[in-house]
Amino acid sequence: MKATIATLLASALLFAAGEAASAADRTETVRFEAGASAATRSGSIKGYDGIVYRLDAGAGQVMQVLFDPSSRSCYFNVATPDGEGNFNGSVSGNEYSANLTASGTYSVQVYLMRNAARRNETCKYSISFEITG
Protein backbone atom coordinates (compact mmCIF):
# COMPACT_ATOMS: atom_id res chain seq x y z
CA MET A 1 0.00 0.00 0.00
CA LYS A 2 2.80 2.42 0.91
CA ALA A 3 4.54 1.77 -2.43
CA THR A 4 1.29 2.46 -4.28
CA ILE A 5 0.76 5.77 -2.49
CA ALA A 6 4.39 6.78 -3.11
CA THR A 7 4.05 5.87 -6.79
CA LEU A 8 0.87 7.91 -7.13
CA LEU A 9 2.47 10.86 -5.34
CA ALA A 10 5.55 10.68 -7.57
CA SER A 11 3.37 10.62 -10.68
CA ALA A 12 1.32 13.57 -9.48
CA LEU A 13 4.41 15.63 -8.67
CA LEU A 14 6.13 14.67 -11.92
CA PHE A 15 3.39 16.20 -13.99
CA ALA A 16 2.42 19.09 -11.71
CA ALA A 17 4.85 21.60 -13.27
CA GLY A 18 3.79 20.80 -16.81
CA GLU A 19 0.54 19.57 -18.17
CA ALA A 20 -1.09 16.43 -16.91
CA ALA A 21 0.09 13.41 -18.85
CA SER A 22 -2.05 12.99 -21.91
CA ALA A 23 -2.84 9.80 -23.75
CA ALA A 24 -0.34 10.96 -26.37
CA ASP A 25 2.63 10.89 -23.97
CA ARG A 26 4.90 8.06 -24.97
CA THR A 27 7.18 6.11 -22.67
CA GLU A 28 10.68 4.85 -23.43
CA THR A 29 12.87 2.69 -21.20
CA VAL A 30 16.51 3.80 -21.18
CA ARG A 31 18.99 0.95 -21.11
CA PHE A 32 22.75 1.41 -21.17
CA GLU A 33 24.90 -0.63 -23.53
CA ALA A 34 27.12 -3.23 -21.87
CA GLY A 35 29.91 -1.49 -19.96
CA ALA A 36 28.44 2.00 -20.47
CA SER A 37 27.26 4.31 -17.71
CA ALA A 38 25.65 6.91 -19.99
CA ALA A 39 23.15 7.15 -22.82
CA THR A 40 21.89 10.04 -24.95
CA ARG A 41 18.55 10.37 -26.68
CA SER A 42 17.48 12.97 -29.22
CA GLY A 43 13.94 13.66 -30.25
CA SER A 44 11.15 16.13 -30.53
CA ILE A 45 7.82 16.74 -28.90
CA LYS A 46 4.91 18.79 -30.16
CA GLY A 47 2.00 20.46 -28.43
CA TYR A 48 0.71 18.51 -25.46
CA ASP A 49 2.51 15.31 -26.57
CA GLY A 50 5.44 14.59 -24.28
CA ILE A 51 7.70 11.69 -23.48
CA VAL A 52 8.60 9.92 -20.26
CA TYR A 53 11.98 8.19 -20.05
CA ARG A 54 12.19 5.47 -17.42
CA LEU A 55 15.48 4.15 -16.05
CA ASP A 56 16.44 1.90 -13.19
CA ALA A 57 19.02 2.96 -10.62
CA GLY A 58 20.05 2.00 -7.12
CA ALA A 59 20.41 3.83 -3.85
CA GLY A 60 23.95 5.11 -3.45
CA GLN A 61 24.45 5.72 -7.17
CA VAL A 62 24.78 9.17 -8.72
CA MET A 63 22.42 10.15 -11.53
CA GLN A 64 22.97 13.09 -13.83
CA VAL A 65 20.61 14.35 -16.55
CA LEU A 66 21.65 17.04 -19.04
CA PHE A 67 18.95 18.57 -21.25
CA ASP A 68 19.47 20.70 -24.37
CA PRO A 69 16.11 21.93 -25.79
CA SER A 70 15.47 24.12 -28.83
CA SER A 71 12.68 26.03 -27.04
CA ARG A 72 12.67 28.13 -23.88
CA SER A 73 9.29 26.55 -23.05
CA CYS A 74 10.62 22.98 -23.13
CA TYR A 75 11.61 21.36 -19.83
CA PHE A 76 12.12 18.09 -18.03
CA ASN A 77 11.11 16.81 -14.61
CA VAL A 78 12.52 13.90 -12.59
CA ALA A 79 10.48 11.75 -10.21
CA THR A 80 12.06 9.29 -7.81
CA PRO A 81 10.62 5.81 -7.31
CA ASP A 82 9.59 6.59 -3.74
CA GLY A 83 8.15 10.05 -4.43
CA GLU A 84 10.47 11.59 -1.83
CA GLY A 85 12.65 13.60 -4.20
CA ASN A 86 11.51 15.34 -7.33
CA PHE A 87 13.15 17.79 -9.71
CA ASN A 88 11.28 20.51 -11.61
CA GLY A 89 13.27 21.73 -14.62
CA SER A 90 11.14 24.84 -15.19
CA VAL A 91 12.29 26.03 -11.75
CA SER A 92 15.75 24.44 -11.44
CA GLY A 93 17.18 24.47 -14.97
CA ASN A 94 18.44 22.02 -17.57
CA GLU A 95 20.82 20.01 -15.37
CA TYR A 96 19.98 17.48 -12.69
CA SER A 97 22.47 15.69 -10.47
CA ALA A 98 21.69 13.70 -7.34
CA ASN A 99 23.10 11.11 -5.01
CA LEU A 100 20.26 8.62 -5.14
CA THR A 101 18.65 7.57 -1.88
CA ALA A 102 16.08 5.15 -3.34
CA SER A 103 16.38 2.12 -5.59
CA GLY A 104 13.89 1.59 -8.39
CA THR A 105 12.62 3.16 -11.56
CA TYR A 106 13.16 6.89 -12.04
CA SER A 107 10.94 8.81 -14.48
CA VAL A 108 12.15 11.75 -16.55
CA GLN A 109 9.35 13.64 -18.31
CA VAL A 110 10.09 15.97 -21.25
CA TYR A 111 7.26 18.41 -21.92
CA LEU A 112 6.28 21.82 -23.28
CA MET A 113 4.82 24.44 -20.97
CA ARG A 114 1.16 25.21 -21.59
CA ASN A 115 1.86 28.47 -23.46
CA ALA A 116 3.85 26.60 -26.13
CA ALA A 117 1.72 23.45 -26.09
CA ARG A 118 -1.42 25.49 -26.68
CA ARG A 119 0.21 26.93 -29.85
CA ASN A 120 1.16 23.38 -30.90
CA GLU A 121 4.86 24.31 -30.97
CA THR A 122 7.61 21.76 -31.52
CA CYS A 123 10.69 21.31 -29.34
CA LYS A 124 13.71 19.41 -30.58
CA TYR A 125 16.01 18.24 -27.81
CA SER A 126 18.92 16.11 -26.74
CA ILE A 127 18.93 14.54 -23.30
CA SER A 128 21.78 12.63 -21.67
CA PHE A 129 21.49 10.23 -18.76
CA GLU A 130 24.44 9.09 -16.67
CA ILE A 131 24.40 6.75 -13.69
CA THR A 132 27.62 6.01 -11.85
CA GLY A 133 28.67 4.29 -8.64
Image: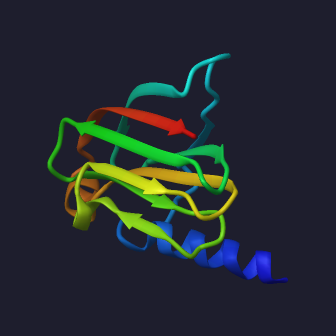
> Which residue is depicted at the point 26% across and 58% down?
118
User: What x and y, as percent, mark residue 72?
Assistant: 14, 49
Vertical placement of residue 123 versus 111, above or below: above
The image shows a total of numbered marks equal to: 0
Q: In the rendering, at what x and y percent does residue 80 appear?
A: 57, 63
Residue furthest to the left in view is 72
Residue 125 in the image: x percent, y percent? 30, 33
Left or right: where does residue 54 sit relative to residue 51? right
Examine the rendering and report whether any part of residue 19 can be seen: no
Nearer the observer, 46 or 69: 69
How does the figure colour the protein chain or chains?
A: rainbow
Residue located at (69% from left, 57% from top):
103
Q: Quadrant of residue 84?
A: bottom right
Instruction: Tell me the residue at 57%/40% (across/down).
Output: 133
Decide which of 12, 65 is in the foreground and name it.
Answer: 65
* On-image quarter of the N terminus: bottom right
Front-most of 30 and 43?
Answer: 30
Q: In the displayed structure, would residue 4 be above or below residue 53? A: below
User: Is 22 placed above or below 125 here?
Assistant: below
Q: Please name the residue shown 23% across and 44% down the image.
A: 121
Q: Is residue 96 visible?
A: yes
- Most extreme residue toward the right is 1
Q: x%, y% of residue 37?
A: 55, 27
